[in-house]
Image (tube, coloured by chain):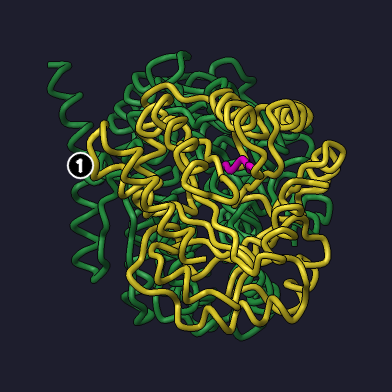
Amino acid sequence: MNRIDARFKLLKQQRRMLLAPFVTVGYPNISTSRDLALGYVEAGADMLEVGVPFSDPIADGPTVQAASQIALDGGTRLIHAFDLIADIRAKTEIPVLLMGYANPFMHHGFPELADDLAASGADGLITPDFLPEHADDLEALTAEKNIHLIRFAAPTTSQKRLEHIAAGAQGFLYCVSVAGVTGSRADLNPLLPDFLARVEGVTSTPRMVGFGISTPQHVRSLRGHAEGVIVASKLIDIVQSSTTKTAVSTASRYVSELVDAT
Amino acid sequence: MPQADLLPDNLGFYGPYGGRYVPETLVAALDELESAFKKYSQSPSFLRELNELLTLYAGRPTPVYYASQLSASVKGAPIYLKREDLAHTGAHKINNALGQGLLARVSGKPRVIAETGAGQHGVASATVCAMLGLDCVVYMGAEDVGRQALNVARMEVLGAEVISVTSGTCTLKDAINEALRDWVTNVENTFYLFGSATGPHPYPQIVREFQRVIGQEARAQITEQTGRLPSHVIACVNGGSNAIGIFDAFISEESVALIGVEAGGRGDSQGNHAATLALGNPGILHGSRSLLLQDDDGQVSTTHSVAAGLDYPGVGPEHAYLQDIGRATYASVTDAQAMDALRLLAKTEGIIAALESAHAVAYAVALAPQLDPNDLVLVNLSGRGDKDMETIAADHKSRR
């Protein structure tokens, strides 16, 4: 069984939501991003999303953009993401997903991408600018390696399309909390529960909520509305405002607070 | 209508190029845009209003002019100019801005966003929004804001808000990133008035449809003036809207050579040019799969051109397809060659072209002497050079 599916099964028994922190590989530098990922695992993260930076991240707000630029300026490449995933896999059995934009993956080659994901021990792939209607080739290649290609649902997604997306979903549906880009927010979209209920109406696939989930309070408020949450920009904000010495411990402590809220 | 085989397939592909590589949030808006476009581009009342605005507001048809002095100075085949520089706001961009502006209005979107490089599409968008009573926000890279200050002032006087984009390379590519982020966030009330023949489906098709008027007019005008079709049609290409607009009417005429001219900048090394069709490879940027200038890890490259409107690492998917099937060829011209051509055209014909359009002129003046006098070269003079006067003046001073 894919580790993502196994994890959701386990958490269902434990009646908890899944908490997945996000790490930009190479931010603030390659070795610290590795320490952050391992720190999050130690802090009780249920799953990890490892982001590979791209020069033109259209779905990301200023926080992830800035982190991506710093990572690229520091020489981060796709191979560093595979290395990081392999390092995590050597230490834990929690599911790990690679997140990135379509172009670097296509440039790498989809067969090579599927091979490298499998070799590094990844369980899933998230590409925010790669719609299911264009993904047949990639989906076939990743499925062969038992890697889930994650699909997105947005509040703007029509009912008919939502049904179509959900019908082919693997692992979980990435539910975008709000029409917008990534970035920490003070408040959640008040219509989010309605949207999540709409998703539940068409599928039993677990719902992971991302974009703007920032605080333990946000996480608590999603209990009963979703099976998991992804936290990205808030953690990058914490790293950014910490010193090199304290970044890993401060951000990891925050992850444990988020886990406690699940 | 264009030939059926030159329309994109139902997923928006021209051969392997095109499509929709966008976040899920935008799919509904693109679907809505596509159905509005399908409906209104066939609607007699919509087309009547558009044609009336093109005629009475934008000043169409723009003339085709025989550049006899320029032709005499370079010898060889005669050179004709399609004078898009004479359209309102000084470039072909107004054609598409009027079409999409009307689409925004009938779609009930009160807020329009646009990206701009040289500022011409931004000015055209601000102009149309002022006339139609729509709010307008224009994203422009900080570097372009600096080198196209006059166009920034024009947009602001027209009532648009110009947002200077300081992320990435601070040019058109980053302005599009920021406009797409705005659209994702404000998709309910906002129409993205896309200026180039790139972007996610259906934008390349829409932009071509609204720029087709260039080729339609030019074909009729040159046939009337000379009794024949041109042997060569030349246009500058970056995203490729003016080129696809003039190529459209000649694609089905196998005897007409279609030549797009890219920015050769300072040379062929990475970061010094924007010759995507010549030197790029397949990639995905800003919602479509096309050719792309990128490094060996799939990161988008920096580019350079003296012409802000050619300084973009991508190209419209239909141009990539036309190159693949051999229907159009693409060449490049350096900064220096473009400036020389601009000066030659100014001296011989009294026309100061935009630096972008000067790339097409440069290719034409190099090609004409190699052709038979019975050949006929048609150049799309896509815009006028007022916006570039600071760059042109600095060059002029350096030559004295």
Q: Quadrant of the N terminus of chain B?
A: bottom right
Viewer-closest of A258 and B112: A258
Residue B291 sits in quarter? top right
Location of residue A203 with respect to B298 vertically, above or below: below
Direction from residue B186 to residue A186 in the image, left or right = left
Q: Position of residue B19 (x, y in %)?
A: 70, 51
Image hue for chain A: yellow
Location of residue B202 with respect to A143 vertically, above or below: below
The verdict on residue B188 being magenta is no
Q: Position of residue B59 (x, y in %)?
A: 41, 66
Direction from residue B381 to residue A186 in the image, left or right = left
Q: Dot 1 surroundings within 10 Å: few (below 14), some, or many (20 or more)? A: few
Query: Which residue is situated farthest in the front direction here?
Result: A14
Can the viewer see residue B33?
A: no
Q: Position of residue A73 (x, y in %)?
A: 36, 26
Can the viewer see residue B43?
A: yes
The residue positioned 63% from the left and 67% from the top of the image is: A227
Location of residue B135 with respect to A29 vertically, above or below: below
Residue at image mark 1? B146
Amino acid bearing label 1: Gly
Region of the chain picked out in magenta, as a range: A96-101
Viewer-closest of A170 and B82: A170
How many numbered marks appear?
1
Magenta stretch, overall SS = strand
Circle 1 sits in a helix, a strand or a loop, which is it?
Answer: helix
The residue positioned 34% from the left and 51% from the top of the image is: A62
The residue positioned 16% from the left and 31% from the top of the image is: B393
Instruction: In the picture, one chain is green; tell me its letter.
Output: B
The verdict on residue A97 being magenta is yes
Viewer-closest of B53 and A43: A43
